[in-house]
Structures are given as C-alpha cells and as structure tokens.
Amino acid sequence: MQEKSDKKNAGKEFSFMKIFGGDIFATEFLKRQAKLLVLIVVLTIFYISNRYSCQQELIRIDQLKTILTDTKYNALTRSSELMEKSRQSKIEEYISTQESDLQTATTPPFLIKE
C-alpha cells in the first residue's frame, strides 16, 4: 500500500529538476488549465500595452499644454504691441518722423443724412 501512495505522490511533487527540465508543463493540471493560462498571459500583455499607450498620450497632452500656453502668451504679446502701435498718438508721431504729406484733420467728422 505504501508503494502505491508513493507512486501517486511522486507524480505530483514539484522539484527543481522538473521545473528546469520542463517536465512541469506536462502535468495534468497545466494541460487542463492551458486555455486559462493563455488568456491570462494575453490579458496581461494587453494591460501592459494599454498602460504604456496611456502614459504616452499623457506625455503628449502635457507637451501640447505647454505649447498652447506659449502660443497664448505670444498672441497676447502681439495683441498688446498692435494696440500700442495703433494708438492715434503713435500714428501721429510716426507720420511726423517720416516727413509725409498726411496731416491730422482739424475739423471733426460729420454725418450725412438723406
């Protein structure tokens, strides 16, 4: 009786030789659970790939936010420069330094009614 139980346990025990030799893949448990193990491996790879792509998208979003901020500041700077250059006093000063025939109107504008 002792020999029969030893033979049953001999097939079930795990040793380093079975693991390194590849005999562990021939066990009945792994044969029955092969589809589940393949599914787990595929889902793990999918999870890692999804996380990596999310991290890459977050990095790209941060880059685009900094570009957008820089562009907004540049637009604000250009707008303030335009406002400064289009003031009447600056235009009159520019015309006087360029020795142009243009002059400031002395009479106010009027509305023509029908």
Image (cartoon, rainbow, N blue to C red):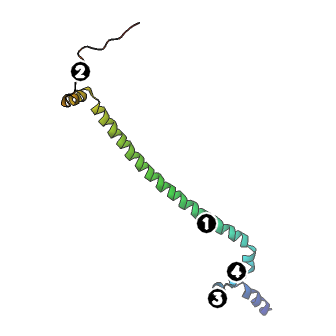
- Left or right: residue 14 versus residue 89 is right
**Tag 2: residue type?**
Thr
Neighbours of disc 3 within 10 Å: few (<14), some (14-19), many (20+) = few
Provide residue 111's location: percent of width, then percent of height. Answer: 35, 11
Q: Earlier in the sequence, mark 2 or mark 1?
A: 1
Q: Residue at x 33, y 39 (%)?
A: 78
- Which residue sits at x=68%, y=82%? 24
What residue sits right under mark 1 in the picture?
Answer: 45
Q: Nearer the viewer, mark 3 or mark 2?
A: 2
N-term-proximal mark, 3 vs 2: 3
Q: Nearer the viewer, residue 9 or 86?
A: 86
- The reply, left or right, for residue 77 in relation to residue 51 is left
Mark 4 belongs to which amino acid? Phe
Q: Which residue is mark 4?
A: 25
Q: Is residue 50 left or right of residue 8?
A: left
- The front one of 80 and 113 is 113
> Considering only order in the chain, which callout, 3 or 1, is on the residue closer to the N terminus?
3
Q: Nearer the viewer, mark 2 or mark 4?
A: 2
Say whether marks 3 and 4 touch (CB < 8 Å). no
Q: CA distance from mark 1 to mark 3?
A: 29 Å
Task: Please name the amino acid that badge 3 sits on.
Answer: Met
Q: Quadrant of the N terminus?
A: bottom right
Amino acid under label 1?
Answer: Ile
Disc with the residue nearer the chain's start (2 vs 4): 4
Q: Are marks 3 and 2 in contact (CB under 8 Å)?
A: no
Of residue 112 and residue 58, the one placed in the foreground of this image is 112
Mark 4: secondary structure:
helix
Q: Which mark is residue 17?
A: 3
